[in-house]
Amino acid sequence: MVQQTTQPQQPKTSQQAEQEQKNSKLLMGIMVGALAGGALALIDSTTRTRVKQGTSNAKNTITQIASDVKEDPSGTKSQVLERVQDTSRILREAVNDLRSIYEKATGDIAGKVNEVQEDSKEAIAATKEAGEQLQEVGDKVKEAKEELVTENDAENQENKNQSVNP
């Protein structure tokens, strides 16, 4: 005969009691909300029809599976295992395909980013060169202007001297 030992329960603290009460209120609120939402959803006739059909389909599927398991438990087990293995294989292939697509896309993007960087560097260099050339042209124009002003001043001075000394 096995002797059961019961440990005396420690009295709950008021904090534990409050927490349990909050948890039970939360659970009750969730249940009431779910029931209210379900009731509101079932007001619509198309939703009711879908729920009935879905429930009926689920019941038929479960009944069929139970019947298959009763008739041939090992066969059903092997079918389920085979489906799981096939699904696993397909998922592995899909993951590998996604990985290769990702790698290709990131490689393509990285290549394009490098191209854009090189093109940007070339454009910046060309812009700097054009700016330097414009500066040179501006300096030459300024020099030409100063030359004209100097010549013009010299002519004006000479004309003044001639008009004063006829």
Image (cartoon, rainbow, N blue to C red):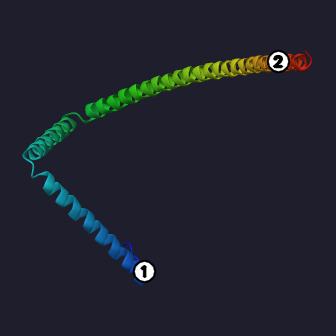
Which structural element holds mark 1?
A: helix
Q: Are marks 1 and 2 in contact (CB under 8 Å)?
A: no
Q: Can residue 12 be spotted in the picture?
A: no
Q: Can residue 96 be spotted in the picture?
A: yes
Q: Depth check: give the residue in front, 13 or 162.
A: 162
Compared across the picture, whether 64 is left or right of 139 comes to left
| Residue 149 image-quadrant placement | top right
Check residue 100 in the rendering and tell me which mark sits there, or answer none.
none
Compared across the picture, whether 132 is left or right of 86 comes to right
Q: Looking at the picture, how far across and down is residue 140, in whole percent?
A: 80, 16
> Is the residue marked by circle 1 packed among few (<14), some (14-19), or many (20+) residues within 10 Å?
few
Circle 2 residue: 152
Q: Compared to 146, does 14 lie above or below?
A: below
Circle 1 residue: 15
User: Going 18% across and 41% down the picture, which residue do you hit?
Assistant: 62
Q: Quadrant of the N terminus?
A: bottom left
Does label 1 or label 2 sit earlier along the sequence? 1
Measured in 3D between alpha carbons, the distance from the residue under mark 1 to the one under mark 2, in whole angstroms, is 102 Å
